[in-house]
Each structure stands twice: as structure tokens, then as C-alpha cells.
Amino acid sequence: MEEIKRHLKILKELGFDEIFLEGEFMNQEDILKEKLNQLKQIETEIKQCTKCDLYKNRIQPVLGEGNPNAVLMFVGEAPGADEDKQGRPFVGRAGKLLTKLIEQAGHKREEFYIANVNKCRPPGNRTPTLEEQEACFPFLERQIEIINPKVLCLLGAAAARAFLGRNVAITKERGQKIIWKDRILILTYHPAYVLRNPNAEPTLFEDIKMAIETAYEN
Ligand code: URA
């Protein structure tokens, strides 16, 4: 990796701004445009999706938002009432806590990508069933492929279950790094749990800080 970086630096100093890759010129702008197109395509598909019953009661699906080149992606459970109304992830009370802790760690929410396992709000904010998670997970997998983050910070046991395919005791398993398909998963509490249990806020903060540091370290 270091050697490739050195070569790229030399090429840049020689005045090369683009590299010929697999028969096509791809500069950063083209890559970003392509990523945005692909994300838009997923959004079109989730608006029409009937793979589970959650579409029947929601106002609108919530794709996710943030930096399409993010090194870190936060993944929650499913939209709540505020998200369902606004069409954006983590904008209610739990989202405000998440945003506050990211800022407390010296970063901005917009640096990262924020999404959920399920794109439609479950009635009464119940936890999505395993079948509902399985129906929606391929959309999230495509988002992950497009954005290509190094680290995924999973907020709460439901998100962790969707990735690990088993029930997760979040209190026992939080704060560890788990390798998943060449990426690093960091499990932590859901911010909504922390709103109900304020003593857990320093732990959620430590996990978020670790996720950010891990994502940015070389
Ligand atoms: N809870 C979640 O899991 N996701 C949101 O977007 C909001 C609340």
C-alpha cells in the first residue's frame, strides 16, 4: 500500500491527475457521480419495494444520507416517527444524541454515512422481525458496496443481529472489533437505549470515538 502511495505521489508531482483503469478514465468526480447514481437507483427501488409488509404503514422509506465516500458508516435499526416524516435517518431524539456524540469526538455528522437495516418504519416502532431484516438487508449490502466504508458502527442489538445472523447481547459484545467481509464492525448501544439509560452515554461515546479513530487510522 505504501509503495503504491509513493508511486501515485510521484505521478502526481509529474502532473498526472488521472489514471487509466480497465479501459476507462475515472477521476474522483466521475466516481462520486457514479456512486450517487447507484444510491439513487436503490432509493427508486425501495420506494417500490413490497418484499415485506412494512411498506404498508410507513409514510416514506428512508434510504440513508451522508458522504458517499465515507470511511465510517453508522447503521441503526429502522426509521422512527421523525425519520418517517422527514425521509432522513436519525433526525429524532436518538439522532440528535448521535450527532452530539460525533461532534463531541471532534467530527461532523456529514463526514460519515448514516443508514438503517430496515428502510421503512415498523408500526409503533417495534423491532423489525428477522424476516423483515432479511428482506431489506440486500439494499444495505449494496449501499455498503457503493460507499465502501472501512468501519461499520452498528447501533443496537437489532442492527448487530442483521449482520451476524444471530441474537447479540449488546452489553457483552459492544466495543469489540469484529471482521465482516473485509470490513470492521464495531457494535455499540443504540442511542435510544442511552436516552432511557443515561449512565450508558460515556460508553456509547467511547465506542463512537473508537469507530472514528479506527476508520481514519492507516
Ligand atoms: N432509530 C433508528 O434505529 N434509526 C433511525 O433512523 C432513528 C431511530
Image (cartoon, grey):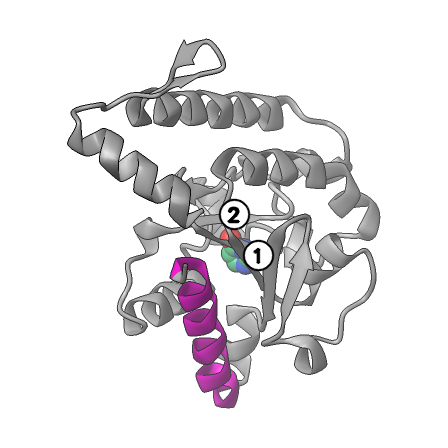
Q: What SS does tag 1 mark? A: strand
Q: Residues within 10 Å of mark 1 (few under 14, many from 20)?
A: many
* Residue 162: mark: none
* Mark 1 lies on residue: 76
Q: Tell me if residue 166 is in the magenta stretch.
A: no
Q: Is residue 12 above or below residue 196?
A: above
**Residue that lies at the very extreme toward the top in this rendered image:** 23
Disc 2 from disc 1: Cα separation: 6 Å
Look at the image and tell me whether residue 21 can be seen: yes
Measuring from the top left, give residue 106's x and y in whole percent: 26, 69
Give the residue drawn at x 49%, y 14%: 22
Question: CB of residue at label 1: within 8 Å of ligand 1?
Answer: yes
105 with respect to 123 (left or right): left
Highlighted range, magenta: 198-216
* Residue 115: mark: 2
Measuring from the top left, give residue 206's x and y in whole percent: 45, 79
Number of marks in picture: 2
Measuring from the top left, give residue 76's x and y in whole percent: 57, 56
Give the residue drawn at x 76%, y 30%: 51
Give the residue drawn at x 61%, y 60%: 185
Which is more toward the observer, 125 or 154? 154
Which is more toward the observer, 17 or 9? 9
Q: What SS does tag 2 mark? A: strand
**Residue that lies at the very extreme toward the bottom in this rendered image:** 199
Q: Is residue 131 above or below residue 201?
A: above
11 with respect to 198 (left or right): left
Amino acid at the residue labelled 1: Gly
Amino acid at the residue labelled 2: Ala
